[in-house]
Amino acid sequence: MKKNIIGLVLTLCSVSAYAQTFVLQSEDIAQGKALGDSHVFNGFGCSGKNISPQLSWKNPPPGTLSFAVTVYDPDAPTGSGWWHWTMVNIPANVQALPANAGDRNNMLLPKGAVQGRNDYGYAGFGGACPPEGASPHRYRFTIWALKTAQLPIDNESSGALAGFMLNANVLATADLDAVYGR
């Protein structure tokens, strides 16, 4: 009986070690708070700096072979939302992206990572720019822990294709939602 109790306690301890919550954090944006001008698009009537925020994550699930980052606006008046950023094939040993990692020149990408095409039409981060006078839009920043080391995504791949591939290979996700209106 004593052996069974000790075994149960050890099992529960090892399970709880893996039960830590997968978390996405940022030094630049906060949950439920407004995006600053740095993260606003420069064009389409907006005049921001179009810089992707610093992101970091912790506690990925066991078996994670790579990560991906997406930024999606479900409130865009398109019928299908708006993809602001997709980055895939982030190596499993990387757990942070510096500010401006989404630059379209790929200068700050982790080795092997690939940015897909956003709905502005280019590969890289495209900041917030909701229609003028609309209610503030939600911008969902998501880190994806994946069961594959590489997805067949290139810089011409759409957000919809990236989303399909991500959902087919996901182990866990963590979100950080910000808002912006003008």
Image (cartoon, helix red, strand yellow):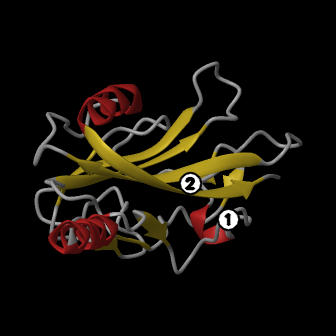
Q: Which residue is under mark 2?
A: 127
Residue 166 lies, with reference to residue 123, above or below; the image says above
Residue at point 11%, 44% (across, down): 150
Q: Amino acid at mark 1?
A: Leu
- Considering the image in quadrants, where does the N terminus appear? bottom left
- What kind of element bears circle 2? loop
- The span from disc 2 to disc 1 (Cα, nearest Å) is 9 Å
Please give the residue where the numbered disc 1 appears in the rendered image: 35
User: Looking at this view, is 108 or 42 the one in front?
Assistant: 108
Give me the residue at 72% from left, 56% from top. Answer: 179
Image coords of residue 36 (percent x, y): 68, 70
Find out whether the residues at labels 2 and 1 contact each other: C-beta distance under 8 Å.
yes
Q: How many marks?
A: 2
Image vertical order of residue 33 relative to residue 84, above or below:
below
Q: Secondary structure at mark 1?
A: loop
Question: Horizontal and vertical percent for residue 107?
Answer: 24, 68
